[in-house]
């Protein structure tokens, strides 16, 4: 398994960003619906990280791409062959009757990537800020309720939330600029 190093994290982020759309296409061509293609791509990256050969491919985009495509294709074929997901090859969108506006595999991957970035940014917050964000933004509790739970004043909760939002925005901003290029 690959060791987690800062340069490896950057490499994996680039690898996901550069290859996710191509891998989703591979899975879709194998007959998977967008949601199943998304799962197959995620599973492919997970499998890639556990392979001993992957350590030798750090920095090699072409070699990594070829390995990821092979893994994705095999995972997609195996998924398609299961009884619940058996699908014919061919006109995939027509065969699945995809509704207009339904998210495609690329959109699901982008959303998952954003969610992972946000989780990483949340992990960088101080403990009390993370708890305040979780209770206020994720659980939907009122500021007074959060203050009572944490034994803080409502004003202190508001300040902690404001500062946490600022830190989250600055943490997410570099990623947003990079993904739009």
Image (cartoon, rainbow, N blue to C red):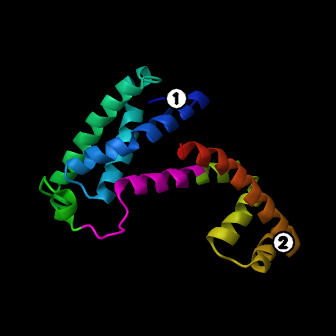
Q: Helix, strand or loop at disc 2? A: loop
In magenta stretch: residue 102: yes
Q: What stretch is highlighted in magenta?
A: 98-117
Determine the CA span between mark 1 and mark 2.
Answer: 41 Å
Q: Is residue 153 visible?
A: no
Give the image location of residue 121, x and y in percent: 65, 50
Of residues 103 and 86, the one drawn nearer to the viewer in this rendering: 103
Looking at this view, name the residue that lies furthest to the top.
Answer: 56
Give the image location of residue 62, x and y in percent: 37, 26
For the residues bearing labels 1 and 2, Cβ distance under 8 angstroms: no
Residue 3 marker: 1
Residue at point 80%, 59% (across, down) = 163
The part of the image, by quadrant, that contains residue 65 is: top left
Q: Can residue 146 be seen in this view?
A: yes
Disc 1 versus disc 2: nearer the observer: 1
Give the image location of residue 32, x and y in percent: 24, 54
Give the overall secondary structure of the magenta segment: helix
Nearer the N terminus, badge 1 or badge 2? 1
Q: Is residue 152 left or right of residue 179?
A: right
Give the image location of residue 127, x and y in percent: 75, 55
Q: In this view, does 19 lie to the left or right of 176?
A: left
In magenta stretch: residue 72: no
Q: Residue beneath label 2, please?
A: 151
- How many labels were placed on the picture? 2
Residue at point 64%, 50% (across, down) = 172
Of residues 34 and 126, the one drawn nearer to the viewer in this rendering: 34
Q: Helix, strand or loop at disc 1? A: loop
Residue at point 61%, 31% (across, down) = 6
Q: Crowding at label 2, few (<14), some or many (≥20) Cα neighbours within 10 Å?
A: few
Q: Crowding at label 1, few (<14), some or many (≥20) Cα neighbours within 10 Å?
A: few
């Amino acid at each position: 398994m690959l060791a987690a190093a800062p340069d490896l994290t950057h490499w994996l982020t680039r690898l996901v960003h550069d290859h996710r759309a191509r891998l989703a296409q591979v899975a879709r061509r194998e007959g998977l619906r967008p949601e199943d293609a998304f799962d197959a791509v995620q599973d492919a990256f997970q499998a890639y990280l556990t392979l001993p050969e992957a350590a030798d491919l750090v920095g090699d985009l072409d070699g990594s791409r070829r390995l990821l495509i092979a893994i994705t294709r095999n995972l997609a074929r195996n998924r398609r062959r299961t009884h619940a997901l058996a699908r014919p090859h061919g006109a995939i969108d027509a065969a699945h009757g995809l509704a207009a506006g339904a998210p495609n595999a690329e959109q699901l991957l982008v959303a998952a990537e954003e969610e992972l970035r946000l989780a990483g940014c949340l992990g960088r917050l101080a403990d009390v800020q993370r708890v305040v964000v979780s209770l206020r933004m994720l659980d939907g509790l009122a500021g007074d309720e959060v203050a009572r739970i944490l034994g803080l004043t409502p004003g202190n909760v508001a300040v902690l939330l404001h500062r946490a939002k600022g830190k989250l925005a600055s943490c997410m901003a570099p990623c947003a600029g990079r993904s739009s290029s």
